Image: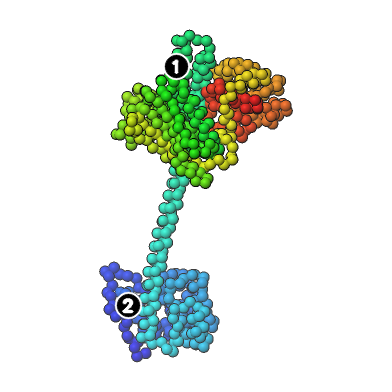
């Protein structure tokens, strides 16, 4: 060949760096020794990118497979077609591309028998990079071909390296995301567990405090109904008032904890607005009379009488605002104002304002008015009492019901606290009650009606003080009662005697209230008693407790400490009086 000694490099050949780079591996696959010799001679002085060539000579496809396994970094393969068989070279290419899935190595077909492997068919059927007939190969063409192949190989390596780096980066990102998700899941489990422990602690504390409170408030209530001299009445009243204050504090803390844990649930049932207002005012009339304050109401006549919402929570807000106003108002009075702020076809915007003639709101304190445990100064707590939870709870309740609460000073003196709530008009869902247990209203004739029935009750209660309190309350109603100190004893007594109603505690030894009720409903206390009315009377005051009692088969749910009026109402409803 005329140009056998042609040396080829890039147009501007680069010198190797001080670090010797490995030579490019070129595999020559041909069964003729002369082809190997010519190829080696033609490319003897060849360099590309500062690197020479390292020839690997294979004389058959079988040998090529072996050498390729030993040198997987081969850059270019110059492959003959006809060797062991007429298409062994093409089969080898198929093996490289399909079996080994090697798409980087550059494959150049060199054949001396073009008729046995036509260029157009080979290119269309096999993943080759170039095709040459041996009769057309010159040193220049071979140099150019190897240069192009190495450039393509180098680019492929770079792209593959970039893809590999991206895959590694993606995998690292996936690993980080997975680790983060695992940490989030673990943290979520920890928080859920912490909330469960907190809820359990609150429920247990509520139960442990309510149990003795039932004795304190219950006995104080009964004592005040006895013929006492003025001094004794004062003592009994102080005991009752202190117990009631402590109970209100417990309820506030429980509500706040439920709000913060996202466990507070709201109902959407019909309620009578006038009844809600009257019931709430009745709670404060005696206190207002004792302090010489006037209580007034102003109701917008355009307001619908029946609305749909959570009556209990709306009443709770009104109780907090009224209690707050009466606490700080020393003279004058308190007015509750209900207004129709806006009305559309299906809903109204209700304005509920409590106006007082007290000292007003300190401008410096207004930004902290609805903060938890916040009062204007420590002297306020010493003078008026309270924990500063009422307004904080009211604001959170209003917010959770998609409403708002505002406060400002009246020009003529005093303050105004106003809640704005968006409520649906009557939905036909019936009167509001909590957890499916109807909240009955006091009827002056109920006591007489109950007494005339000759009712006999069974009290399932393990606490001796609570046994005595309930028995005394029932005695005043002329109701005969028996006491069972646990659920098992209650079942035994019901098998021997017929009762009209059961007052059931929940936490009892031997057999608890839930299990006992299920057994009663299943006939374990006698077939005649399976449908007996059962009223839960428990210190367990959480919503889930009420739901569990209802699911077990109880008809009504009362929490300790129980007021005689609530007990009368529950008995009357359970008996259908």
Vertically, is 88 above or below 319?
A: below
Vertically, is 301 above or below 385?
A: below
Q: In this image, 61 relative to 172: left or right?
A: right
Residue 238 marker:
1
Q: Quadrant of residue 341?
A: top left
Vertically, is 35 above or below 459?
A: below
Give the residue displayed 55% in from the left and 21% down from the top: 564
Q: Secondary structure at mark 1?
A: helix
Q: Which residue is mark 2?
A: 47
Pick whichever of labels 1 and 2 is earlier in the sequence: 2
Which quadrant: the C terminus?
Answer: top right
Give the residue displayed 46% in from the left and 81% down from the top: 109
Which quadrant: the N terminus?
Answer: bottom left
Q: Residues within 10 Å of mark 1 (few under 14, many from 20)?
A: few
> Which one is nearer the viewer's eye here, 252 or 333?
333
Question: x, y percentage for residue 329?
Answer: 37, 25
């Amino acid at each position: 060949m005329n140009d056998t000694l042609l040396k080829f490099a890039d147009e501007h050949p680069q010198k190797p760096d001080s670090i010797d780079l490995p030579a490019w591996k070129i595999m020559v696959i041909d069964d003729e020794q002369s082809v190997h010799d010519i190829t080696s001679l033609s490319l003897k002085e060849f360099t590309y990118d500062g690197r020479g060539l390292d020839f690997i000579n294979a004389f058959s496809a079988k040998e090529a497979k072996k050498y390729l396994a030993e040198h997987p970094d081969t850059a270019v393969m110059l492959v003959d077609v006809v060797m062991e068989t007429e298409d062994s070279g093409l089969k080898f290419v198929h093996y490289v591309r399909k079996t080994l899935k090697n798409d980087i190595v550059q494959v150049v077909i060199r054949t001396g028998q073009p008729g046995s492997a036509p260029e157009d068919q080979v290119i269309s059927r096999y993943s080759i990079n170039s095709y040459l007939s041996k009769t057309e190969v010159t040193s220049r063409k071979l140099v150019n071909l190897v240069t192009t192949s190495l450039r393509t190989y180098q680019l492929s390596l770079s792209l593959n390296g970039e893809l590999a780096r991206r895959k590694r980066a993606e995998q690292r990102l996936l690993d980080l995301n997975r680790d983060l998700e695992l940490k989030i899941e673990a943290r979520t489990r920890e928080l859920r567990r912490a909330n469960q422990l907190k809820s359990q602690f609150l429920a247990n504390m509520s139960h442990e405090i309510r149990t003795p409170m039932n004795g304190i408030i219950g006995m104080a209530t009964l004592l005040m109904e006895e013929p006492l001299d003025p001094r004794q009445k004062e003592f009994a009243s102080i005991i009752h008032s202190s117990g009631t204050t402590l109970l209100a504090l417990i309820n506030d803390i429980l509500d706040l904890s439920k709000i913060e844990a996202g466990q507070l649930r709201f109902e959407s049932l019909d309620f009578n607005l006038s009844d809600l207002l009257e019931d709430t005012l009745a709670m404060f009339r005696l206190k207002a009379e004792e302090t010489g304050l006037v209580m007034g109401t102003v109701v917008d006549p355009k307001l619908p009488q029946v609305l749909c919402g959570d009556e209990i929570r709306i009443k709770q807000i009104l109780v907090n605002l009224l209690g707050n106003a009466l606490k700080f108002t020393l003279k004058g009075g308190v007015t509750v104002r209900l207004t129709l702020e806006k009305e559309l076809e299906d809903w109204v915007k209700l304005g509920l304002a409590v106006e007082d003639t007290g000292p007003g709101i300190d401008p410096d304190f207004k930004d902290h008015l609805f903060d938890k445990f916040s009062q204007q100064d420590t002297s306020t707590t010493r003078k008026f009492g309270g924990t500063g939870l009422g307004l904080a709870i009211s604001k959170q309740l209003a917010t959770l019901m998609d409403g708002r609460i505002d406060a400002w000073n009246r020009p003529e003196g005093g303050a105004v606290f106003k809640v704005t709530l968006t409520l649906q008009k009557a939905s036909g869902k019936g009167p509001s009650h909590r957890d499916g247990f109807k909240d009955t209203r006091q009827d002056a004739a109920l006591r007489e009606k109950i007494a005339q029935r000759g009712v006999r009750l069974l009290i399932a209660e393990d606490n001796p003080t609570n046994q005595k309190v309930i028995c005394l309350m029932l005695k005043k109603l002329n109701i005969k009662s028996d006491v069972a100190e646990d659920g098992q004893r209650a079942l035994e007594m019901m098998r021997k005697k017929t009762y009209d109603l059961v007052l059931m505690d929940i936490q009892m030894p031997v057999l608890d209230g839930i299990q006992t009720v299920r057994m009663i409903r299943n006939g374990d206390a006698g077939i005649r008693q399976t449908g007996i009315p059962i009223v839960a009377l428990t210190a367990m005051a959480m919503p889930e407790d009420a739901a569990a009692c209802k699911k077990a088969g109880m008809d009504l749910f009362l929490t300790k400490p129980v007021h005689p009026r609530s007990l009368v109402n529950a008995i009357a409803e359970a008996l259908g009086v």
